[in-house]
Image: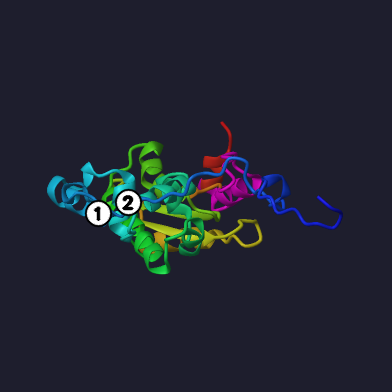
């Protein structure tokens, strides 16, 4: 080859280097649309024939949201960290989590979750008899354990220790300056309740009662102060 001549070979060594973004690129995923499943395998058909209990979590999500591929529902579950994770996410967060979840699908999912929560809460609170702290935990834990803000609630009881109502007194960061003890007893007085139970969540996950909470609980009246005084 004379100086100045350009190589005409197709040897890869002469090719312009290209930027490789992945050493071992994953194969493209081409999930089978649900409409191409056998009819007997489609989630809606299975629900109609076998009942909702026969469906997996992903299949139930697919029925609720109407996503075209079961893989989308599976990826949503994984990204959210399971069903409990879905409960804590907003509609905007659901859309951002996985491609294929539109505003409408996210709204349908949140509506279904809220209906399920209300059914569970309604069944539990239906004049439930409170015999122990465990009964209160069963009543409130499902919802309050997933709240991302602090809340102070009261469970109001009649003379037979049956639940009359559950009242949310405060939402947000609790501190001594914003808590009025009168608000804690307000609904109880209105309903002529015989007793009330105060419940408070810890979004941080640390269940240790803060000094502020003890001051709130123990400042109501002389009887409340006696109940809070260590024996």
Q: Is residue 123 left or right of residue 90?
A: left
**Residue range highlighted in magenta:** 203-223
Q: Residue furthest right?
A: 3
Disc 2 is placed on an element classified as loop
Residue that carries the numbered disc 1 in the rendered image: 36
Residue 38: % across, % down: 19, 49
Q: Is residue 158 shown to the viewer in this render?
A: no
From the viewer's perspective, is residue 111 above or below residue 209?
below
Quadrant for the C terminus, please: top right
From the viewer's perspective, is residue 106 above or below residue 87?
below
Q: Quadrant of residue 172?
A: bottom right
Residues marked 1 and 2 touching at CB (< 8 Å): yes
Residue depicted at x 48% and y 61%: 90
From the viewer's perspective, is residue 110 above or below residue 49?
below
Residue that carries the numbered disc 2 in the rendered image: 32
Q: Which mark is residue 56?
A: none
Q: Nearer the viewer, residue 89 or 49?
A: 49
Q: Residues within 10 Å of mark 2 (few under 14, many from 20)?
A: few
Label 1 to label 2: alpha-carbon separation: 7 Å
Q: Is residue 99 shown to the viewer in this render?
A: yes
Residue 137: % across, % down: 41, 41
Residue depicted at x 29% and y 49%: 59
Whether 204 is among the magenta residues is yes
């Amino acid at each position: 080859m004379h100086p100045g001549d350009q190589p005409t070979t197709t040897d890869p060594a002469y090719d312009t280097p290209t930027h490789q973004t992945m050493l071992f690129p994953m194969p493209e995923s081409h999930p089978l649309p649900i409409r191409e499943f056998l009819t007997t395998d489609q989630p809606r058909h299975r629900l109609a024939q076998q009942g909702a209990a026969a469906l997996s979590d992903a299949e139930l999500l697919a029925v609720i949201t109407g996503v075209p591929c079961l893989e989308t529902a599976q990826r949503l579950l994984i990204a959210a960290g399971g069903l409990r994770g879905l409960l804590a996410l907003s509609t905007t967060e659901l859309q951002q989590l996985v491609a294929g979840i539109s505003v409408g699908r996210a709204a349908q999912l949140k509506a279904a979750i809220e209906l399920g929560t209300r059914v569970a809460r309604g069944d539990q609170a239906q004049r439930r008899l409170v015999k122990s702290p465990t009964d209160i935990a069963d009543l409130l834990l499902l919802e309050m354990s997933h709240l991302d803000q602090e809340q102070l609630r009261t469970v109001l009881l009649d003379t037979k220790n049956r639940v009359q109502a559950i009242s949310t007194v405060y939402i947000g960061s609790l501190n001594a300056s914003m808590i009025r003890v009168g608000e804690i007893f307000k609904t109880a007085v209105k309903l002529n309740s015989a007793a009330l139970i105060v419940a408070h969540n810890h979004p941080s996950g640390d269940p240790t009662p803060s000094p502020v909470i003890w001051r709130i609980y123990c400042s109501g009246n002389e009887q409340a102060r006696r109940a809070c005084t260590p024996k």
